Image (spheres, rainbow, N blue to C red):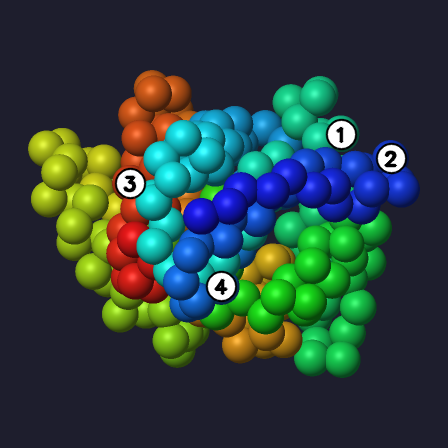
Amino acid sequence: MLVTKHRLAASTPYATPYYMVRAARPGPVMMITAGIHGNETASMTAAQKLVNDCDTESDYIRRGLLIVVPRVNQQAYSRKIRGKPDMNRTFPRKKSGKATHPLASALFKLALKHHPDWWLDLHEANGLSQLSRNVLGQTLITNPGSSAIPACRRAIQRINRTIPRRDLHFNLKQHELPGSARTAANLVLQARSVTVETCWSLKRSDRIQYQSEMLHHFLKEARMI
Ligand SMILES: [Zn+2]
């Protein structure tokens, strides 16, 4: 397994590192992004931690190619803001459409080059989905009818078994969000794209743990570990 570091949008003010993790054996391609919103920091830490684990444990990924962008919007992150405009509305809205943000454009070009089978986009949100259907904290989100739904249901079952408090359990939501990385990946790349949302009023260490566990479950689903 080989971990290499690269730069996305290298010649722009949005330059940000990304990592390619190549397993010894061929297999699926999975893209993992965090920090499309600059204030959702537990997801960024979890993505970076996965890269570090791959670096220290040489057989962590057994098959395929992992592409991780742990902190997409560095400018928003440095100010701990969501980012303006909201980058997660600037990805292609049609098959022939183009991204309207330089960073979204660079990220989507990277994806088009490698044709990910999976795209996990890590976020954080308000509220607990067990307590209100109007909030997104502790959810997985796919597009309606996505081929990722069975894997999401299994990942949720597995993680919920480890969470004693029922109000912190995860739920699945199916929602089309035009201009989001998830919906663009579904529409243009036909990738199994999933948004992971932890609740950011929880303890930071717990949020990192939930994000990391979800990554682990999906790597298993993709048979990459
Ligand atoms: Zn977000």
Q: Quadrant of residue 59?
A: top left
* For residue 127, side relative to residue 160 (left or right): right
User: How far, Cα to Cα, is label 2 from label 3?
Assistant: 33 Å
Q: Are marks 1 and 2 in contact (CB under 8 Å)?
A: yes
User: How far, Cα to Cα, is label 4 from label 1?
Assistant: 28 Å
Reading the chain from its start, which is encountered first: label 4 or label 2? 2
On whether ligand 1 comes within 8 Å of the CB at mark 4, the answer is: no
Tell me, yes or no, if residue 158 can be seen here. Answer: yes
| Amino acid type assigned to the residue bearing label 2 in the image | Pro
Q: What residue is rendered at 37% in x and 50% in y?
A: 61
Secondary structure state at the residue bearing disc 2: loop
* For residue 11, side relative to residue 66 (left or right): right
User: How far, Cα to Cα, is label 4 from label 3?
Assistant: 19 Å
Nearest the viewer among 172 and 55 is 55
User: How far, Cα to Cα, is label 1 from label 2?
Assistant: 8 Å
Reading the chain from its start, which is encountered first: label 2 or label 3? 2
Secondary structure state at the residue bearing disc 3: helix
| Amino acid type assigned to the residue bearing label 4 in the image | Val
Task: List the residue tagged with mark 4.
Answer: 29
Mark 2 crowdedness (10 Å alpha carbons): few <14, some 14-19, many ≥20: few
Q: Which mark is residue 200?
A: none
Task: List the residue tagged with mark 2.
Answer: 13
Q: Position of residue 64 (x, y in %)?
A: 44, 61
Label tally: 4
Task: List the residue tagged with mark 1.
Answer: 75
* For residue 82, side relative to residue 49 (left or right): right
